[in-house]
Image (cartoon, helix red, strand yellow):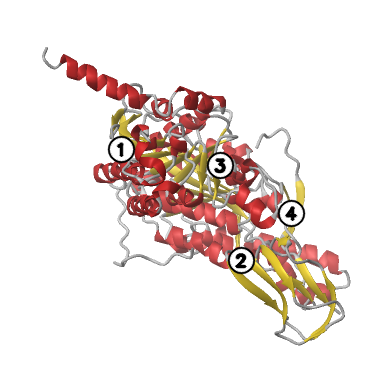
């Protein structure tokens, strides 16, 4: 064929790009326990589904000796492929090419694939492994970051955006992950910070390693900047595939429904929650006694453990769970747990995922540190997120529901669709001890035996008010149910709410407390 | 969290005492103390460039105590009170983090 030579030529050109930064750079990458950009893409996507674009793109920088520099693909790999059979757009920075540094052409490749993702309404995955801005390209590098941030913001709430940090991600570069929905990090590999250890040492004399400053543990446990922690890249990629199987590909669709599987027999819902409201239990066991096959995919597992969020399927349908965790800090709401829950509620609402709230909390965490950290503003986020959400919202009150916490956790008053309570639920303006001390202060102080009187009044309050029937008498609770009926009630509620319409006033956008 | 090595602790609230686990953040929180106006702390990380007062010196409110560079800018610490300098904790050229005691008044 006449074109044979041209096809050989094409292959040759392709081969020269495919070896990235060359054998030595790849070896260095491997020595750090890291895969190359294309290996990572292949590992995340369905086998053989990756189609790469823009492999022949070149940079146009001329200063500082750049005109003689050939950078394979300008240090980034872009393309489309499928995950679980469904299309996605993906880019991966190639650290072996000039440290994966971001110049104008590099950024344009990224924004191109972001535009594809948004226009085609398919999820976007961005793999970050870059030394940062390509200093030689000056303000053009900054322009590139800005164009990425704008697109992240435009795509927010329209398509799922996933950031995977698999190397350094420093300076301005961190703001792209921060603007996306979910950030995945790998222990020992991922690093995110605004100013690095060297700057900190120069300015402050404080010595800290990159890992200690912005490693996976730091961001998954301490800062809440990342949502998924993995021990290695393979585990991280499995998490990404699981997440994508649970969420829809854009905000006009619902997540895929799969065949229903009953929860596992070992999770006995009626045996998990102790009667004594001061005794802890793991609320994840309650979730697993409700979900199909007892599967629960937890989000932000290591951050603000006093609230549990994540996905499970009920009757084959993806549901977002928000649950107070009595096992950690008695399940109180505080700044961090409010932030964590509120953002998750907004995510579920954006992507048509019904929310099931499991409630058992003593209220908000007291303390000067909390008040001065702005717990008013942070706590308000939960109220805002629930009130704003138009997806089906179902609440099950397992045990304690006191005070502000009762209102915040998707109460009837925030227009929950269904509120159920277990017979042991204590729905009251505050806990019996606190309430008795205030209401019966005079009786207690003037009694011959104040301690005995206090106990008597606590018991009296408990009997009269710390139960689900006062709220049920007002219709604030729709049904008091046997714990064993919980899954059945949730399945029925999901059916009833499937065509829910909740109108909201027209506005440009609301002003949620940030 | 693996369920085997959970250590339950008491957590006190006005509604009684709960048995639960406590987070590191909660355990490491600092108790609140009313700030002492006689102690001057750094409010931004930076490098001290000069000390403008001496121990024992009487200083008027607003008078410059020391100068420093932070975030590519030169700046000064003015005295928030009138009083006598008791102790100076830093010297010119020293890099200081945020929240470090710089000067103490009598």
Which corner quadrant of the image does residue A501 belong to?
bottom left
Q: What separation in Å lies between label 3 and label 1 (alpha carbons)? A: 28 Å
Residue B59 vertical position relative to residue B26 in the rendered view, above or below: below
Q: Are marks 2 and 1 in contact (CB under 8 Å)?
A: no
Write down the chain letter for disc 1. Answer: A
| Mark 4: secondary structure | loop
Q: Residue at x 60, y 34 (%)?
A: A188
Q: Quadrant of the N terminus of chain A?
A: top left
Q: Residue at x 54, y 38 (%)?
A: A190
Which corner quadrant of the image does residue A502 belong to?
bottom left
Percent x, y for residue A175? 46, 51
Percent x, y for residue A18? 36, 25
Image disc number at residue A429? 2
Between marks 4 and 1 in the image, the one whose residue lies nearer the viewer:
1
Q: What separation in Å lies between label 2 and label 4 (alpha carbons)? A: 31 Å
- Residue topped by disc 4: B28
């Amino acid at each position: 064929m006449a074109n044979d030579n041209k096809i050989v030529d094409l292959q040759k050109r392709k081969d020269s790009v495919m070896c990235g930064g060359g054998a030595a750079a790849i070896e260095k990458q491997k020595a750090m326990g890291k895969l190359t950009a294309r290996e990572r893409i292949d590992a995340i996507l369905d086998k053989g589904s990756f189609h790469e674009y823009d492999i022949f793109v070149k940079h146009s920088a001329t200063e500082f000796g750049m005109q003689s520099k050939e950078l394979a693909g300008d240090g980034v790999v872009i393309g489309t492929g499928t995950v679980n059979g469904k299309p996605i757009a993906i880019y991966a920075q190639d650290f072996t090419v000039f440290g994966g540094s971001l110049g104008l052409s590099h950024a344009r490749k990224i924004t191109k694939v972001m535009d594809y993702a948004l226009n085609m309404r398919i999820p976007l995955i961005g793999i970050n492994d870059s030394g940062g801005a390509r200093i030689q390209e000056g303000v053009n590098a900054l322009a590139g970051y800005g164009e990425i941030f704008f697109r992240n913001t435009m795509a927010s709430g329209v398509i799922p955006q996933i950031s995977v940090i698999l190397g350094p991600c420093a300076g301005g570069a961190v703001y792209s992950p921060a603007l996306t929905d979910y950030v995945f990090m790998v222990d020992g590999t991922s690093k995110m910070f605004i100013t690095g250890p060297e700057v900190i040492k120069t300015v402050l004399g404080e010595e800290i390693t990159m890992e200690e400053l912005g490693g996976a543990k730091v961001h998954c446990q301490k800062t809440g900047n990342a949502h998924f922690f993995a021990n290695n890249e393979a585990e991280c990629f499995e998490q990404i595939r699981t997440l994508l199987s649970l969420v829809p590909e854009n905000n006009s669709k619902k997540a895929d429904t799969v065949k229903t599987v009953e929860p596992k027999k070992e999770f006995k819902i009626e045996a998990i929650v102790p009667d004594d409201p001061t005794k802890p239990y793991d609320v994840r066991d309650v979730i697993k006694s409700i979900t199909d096959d007892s599967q629960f995919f937890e989000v932000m597992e290591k951050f603000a453990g006093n609230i549990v969020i994540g996905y499970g399927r009920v009757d084959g349908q993806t549901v977002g769970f928000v649950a107070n965790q009595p096992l950690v800090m008695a399940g109180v709401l505080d700044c961090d747990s409010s932030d964590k829950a509120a953002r998750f509620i907004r995510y579920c609402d954006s992507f048509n995922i019904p929310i099931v709230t499991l409630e058992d909390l003593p209220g908000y965490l007291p303390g000067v540190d909390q008040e001065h950290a702005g717990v008013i503003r942070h706590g308000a986020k939960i109220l805002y997120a629930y009130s704003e959400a138009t997806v089906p919202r179902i609440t099950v009150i397992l045990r304690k529901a006191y005070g502000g916490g009762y209102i915040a956790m998707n109460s009837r008053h925030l227009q929950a669709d269904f509120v159920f309570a277990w017979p042991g639920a204590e729905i009251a303006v505050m806990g019996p001890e606190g309430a008795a001390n205030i209401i019966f202060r005079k009786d207690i102080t003037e009694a011959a035996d104040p301690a005995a009187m206090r106990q008597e009044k606590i018991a009296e309050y408990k009997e009269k008010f710390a139960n689900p029937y006062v709220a049920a008498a007002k219709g604030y609770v729709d049904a008091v149910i046997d714990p064993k009926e919980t899954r059945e009630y949730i399945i029925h509620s999901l059916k009833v709410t499937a065509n829910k319409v909740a109108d909201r006033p027209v506005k440009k956008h609301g002003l949620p407390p940030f | 969290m693996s369920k085997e090595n959970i250590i339950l602790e008491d957590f006190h609230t006005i509604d009684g005492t709960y048995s639960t686990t406590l987070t590191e953040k909660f355990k490491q929180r600092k108790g609140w103390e009313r700030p002492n106006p006689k102690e001057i702390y750094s409010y931004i990380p930076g490098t001290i460039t000069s000390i403008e007062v001496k121990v024992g010196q009487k200083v008027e409110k607003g008078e410059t105590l020391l100068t420093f560079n932070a975030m590519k800018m030169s700046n000064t610490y003015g005295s928030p009170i009138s009083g006598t300098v008791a102790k100076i904790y830093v010297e010119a050229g020293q890099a200081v983090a945020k929240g470090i005691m710089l000067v103490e008044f009598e």
